[in-house]
């Protein structure tokens, strides 16, 4: 980040608080995502805010601001946007501290308790935020996401061709996703995007939110980066979500638990395949580090859900006999 941009950012942040640059302190970045950078602003008296720097030629902050304002007005736990300069890509936000949820996964009981709390936050999002103004998580988008797997993971990284069972699987995953009730979907409801502040969970990085399947954020949470739950634990979490969704009308009584659990496994397979492709693209195209080492974790997630989809036995067998050995061999070759 250039000294000119730092100076402009500091000057703007001071002006939004009716202060001069000499009155405030701008610390080093407190986090980063994509081309966005975050700085902590300390005001006279010691209170703090966060300044987001999102260069407009690389990041469109309009969706973030619009969604933040709507969701905050709906009483949802998101950072308040105190000021926005979209022409320069500067935002002034609530400071939610330094504790992403995964930092509190210290033992099994605590981890499960926080996941139960996060399920409540998903319910609040789906009940309070209308999906009408969000982009549709439609067939085209679902298909583009799934196609990241054969393009980047199989083709670009492993030099494998997808099996014949890929196309029937791809179609089932899309159809099952589109068959679910449409709600507001954060789209990356993983622990790293949940900040713990004053004993409450807050959502961040929601700029890619869509109108999509009821189970998507549930799966982002349960099949995320940091935990692998047993089949029983997974089923229990899904059942808690299912019962609450039935009670508050998000899910019809005509959908029994077995059918919803299957929809969740289908959604989990879709997301795992998408993530496998994205992580390879981040590595190969965007020169990001640290993503390939996470592939086995999401492969475990994929196999966990495929094992519950009996009609996809052929693809599951290919994953076990061909894909997993090829992926592990490639990772081993990269180890110094």
Image (cartoon, helix red, strand yellow):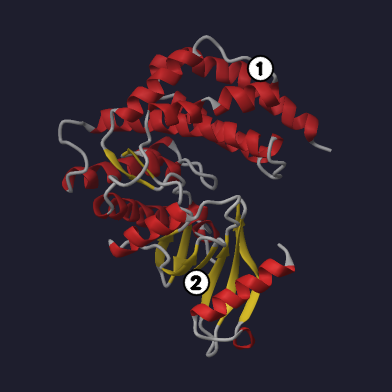
Q: Residue furthest front?
A: 87
168, above or below 19, in the image: above
Residue in the image at 50% along x and 41% along y:
228
- 66 to the left or right of 146: left
169, above or below 332, in the image: above
- 10 to the left or right of 174: right
Characterize the local packing of mark 1: few (<14), some (14-19) or many (20 or more) Cα atoms within 10 angstroms.
some
- Residue 95's mark? 2
Q: In the picture, which quadrant includes the C terminus?
A: top right
**Circles 1, 2 touching at the beta carbon (< 8 Å):** no
Q: In the picture, which quadrant includes the N terminus?
A: bottom right
Q: Nearer the viewer, residue 82 or 187?
A: 82
Residue in the image at 69% along x and 36% along y:
285
- Residue 160's mark? 1
Residue 25 visible in the snapshot:
yes
Under tag 1, what secondary structure? loop
- Residue 276's mark? none
Number of numbered callouts drawn: 2
Q: Residue furthest bottom?
A: 45
Where residue 98 sits: x, y (%)? 55, 67
Where residue 152 sits: x, y (%)? 63, 27
Under tag 2, what secondary structure? loop
In the picture, residue 174 is in which quadrant? Answer: top left
Q: Residue furthest top?
A: 164
Q: Nearer the viewer, residue 122 or 300?
A: 122
């Amino acid at each position: 980040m250039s000294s000119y941009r730092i100076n402009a950012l500091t000057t703007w942040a001071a002006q939004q608080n009716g202060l001069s640059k000499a009155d405030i302190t701008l610390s080093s970045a407190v986090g980063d995502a994509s081309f966005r950078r975050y700085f902590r602003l300390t005001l006279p008296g010691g209170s703090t805010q966060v300044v987001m720097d999102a260069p407009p030629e690389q990041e469109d902050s309009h969706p973030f601001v619009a969604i933040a304002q709507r969701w905050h007005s709906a009483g949802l736990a998101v950072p308040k946007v105190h000021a926005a300069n979209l022409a320069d890509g500067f935002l002034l936000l609530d400071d939610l501290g330094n504790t992403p949820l995964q930092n509190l996964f210290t033992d099994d009981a605590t981890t499960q308790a926080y996941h139960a709390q996060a399920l409540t936050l998903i319910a609040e999002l789906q009940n309070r935020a209308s999906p009408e103004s969000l982009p549709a998580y439609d067939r085209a988008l679902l298909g583009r996401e799934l196609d990241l797997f054969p393009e980047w993971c199989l083709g670009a990284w492993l030099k494998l061709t997808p099996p014949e069972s890929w196309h029937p699987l791809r179609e089932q995953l899309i159809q099952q996703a589109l068959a679910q009730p449409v709600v507001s979907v954060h789209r990356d409801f993983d622990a790293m995007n949940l900040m713990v502040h004053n004993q409450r969970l807050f959502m961040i990085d929601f700029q890619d939110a869509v109108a999509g399947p009821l189970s998507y954020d549930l799966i982002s949470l349960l099949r995320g980066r940091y935990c692998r739950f047993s089949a029983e634990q997974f089923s229990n979490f899904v059942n808690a979500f299912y019962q609450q969704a039935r009670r508050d009308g998000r899910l019809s009584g005509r959908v029994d638990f077995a059918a919803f659990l299957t929809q969740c496994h289908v959604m989990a397979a879709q997301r795992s395949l998408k993530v496998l492709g994205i992580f390879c693209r981040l590595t190969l195209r965007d020169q990001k580090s640290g993503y390939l080492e996470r592939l086995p974790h999401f492969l475990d997630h994929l196999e966990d859900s495929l094992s519950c989809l009996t009609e996809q036995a052929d693809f599951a067998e290919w994953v076990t006999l061909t894909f997993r050995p090829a992926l592990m061999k490639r990772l081993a070759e990269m180890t110094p």
